[in-house]
Image: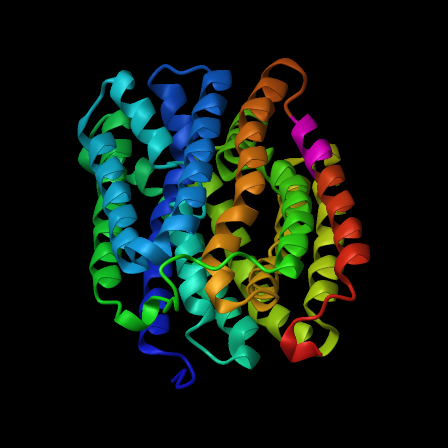
Amino acid sequence: MLSWLSRDGKLLLAVRPLQSFASSFVSVFIAVFLSIIGLPLWQIGLVLTGGLISSTLLNLITGFLADRLGRRRMLVLFGLIATFSGAVFAFVSNLAVLIPVAIISTLGYRGGFGPASMLERVILAQSCPAGRRTRMYSIRSTLSSLATSAGSLFTGMVVLLQSWLAISEVASYRAMFGVYALLNLGAVVLYSLLSQEAEVELTKDEVPPLSPETRGNVLKLSLLFSVDSFGGGLLTSSLVSYWFFARFGLGMDLIGVIFSVSSLLSAASFMLAARISERIGLINTIVYSHLPSNMMTMAIPYMPTLAASTGLYLSRALLSQMDVPTRQSYVMAIVKPEERSRVAGLINLPRSLTRAISPSLAGFIMQFMGLSLPFLIAGGLKAVYDLTLYFTFRDVKPPEEE
């Protein structure tokens, strides 16, 4: 099975479900947990922003140092940081400790620890033939989404633990953080099994500079991705979870079900994205799927009932994530292998910075201007991104499309 994928590629595909499962249930309830232990919503937004700023800095550092220090070593380090953060939240109650730990480890970010995921994508790009790259990223995204679905459903354990074990609400959340720590420890074990083939061989002591063509593409993609990321940051899983909690009074068990079904629908679209991209191209697949989903995003607040809002949110999930594997494949395709670590770090820099700003802004908007306003802003910005991306890069083809 997957004979065209290297052993390292298979190991990283095995890591992704572990981390996606863990990060998904934490991202769903962390905003609610922080509110329970005494943080107001606008401060919760700042914590999420701080975590994304931390991820931004680590992404940039990782992009430039990973090929020097070793990709495997850095992955193990990041896995240990995630494990440590879960253990701290499981056993420590002091907010002065919890908040810095949440920021450094980017708790609440649904995709897992950002620098680790970035390095995984870079290694995976060299673990299979170019013609299979998009399909490989689609498989990775499918596994991630299925695990995210299961993790979102697992959020309901918070309620079950309280009834089964007769423990307090806070204690049930702490138990879940313990599970998060154990899952990330499993990822550390898998990272340690990676081979030397996960690294890149440099012909000189110094890393060669990026080519002029790569620099131009990176600049344009960075600006475009930053717009998309800013819009996405207005609707993080934590804030959408809070929106369902505040507007409709849903408990974490029902919110978990909504996010679980959403992830299942996204998973169904990933493999379809790979097949479609083979027929119409990566850029066309990204835009044709993403633009309609953003129209749906803008309409969600206008739905009069819980059923209608949930139905539209789930319909959006069928399209909103099809650009994930195609975008990842496209970026890795149009740069040289020795440039991929740095390009991943550079492209993530403005993307992460803008995404870091938006959760705190969204928290402020939701509290003082309107609970549903972030949906309108996010959908509009992301639609602008879709159209600009199409007209800028429709003639820049990856090797397999030329």
Question: In the rendered image, which quarter contains the C terminus?
Answer: bottom right
280 over 296 or under it: above or below:
below
Q: Main secondary structure of the magenta part?
A: helix
Q: Is residue 301 left or right of residue 248?
A: right
Residue pictured at 59% horizontal, 16% vertical: 367
Along the line of sight, the residue nearer the viewer: 105 or 167: 105
Q: Nearer the viewer, residue 326 or 375?
A: 326
Q: Is residue 84 left or right of residue 250?
A: left
The magenta region covers: 372-378
Identified at 48% across, 53% down, the residue is 342
| Residue 202 vs residue 389, the one in the foreground | 202
Q: Image point 33% across, 23% down: which residue?
A: 99
The image shows residue 295, relative to residue 175, as above or below, that is below
Above-or-below relation of 185 to 276: above
> Is 386 above or below relative to 36?
below
Q: Position of residue 74 (x, y in %)?
A: 29, 52
350 inside magenta stretch: no
Percent across and percent down for residue 338 are: 46, 65
- For the point 39% across and 48% down, the residue is 62
Of the 4 image quadrants, the one containing the N terminus is: bottom left
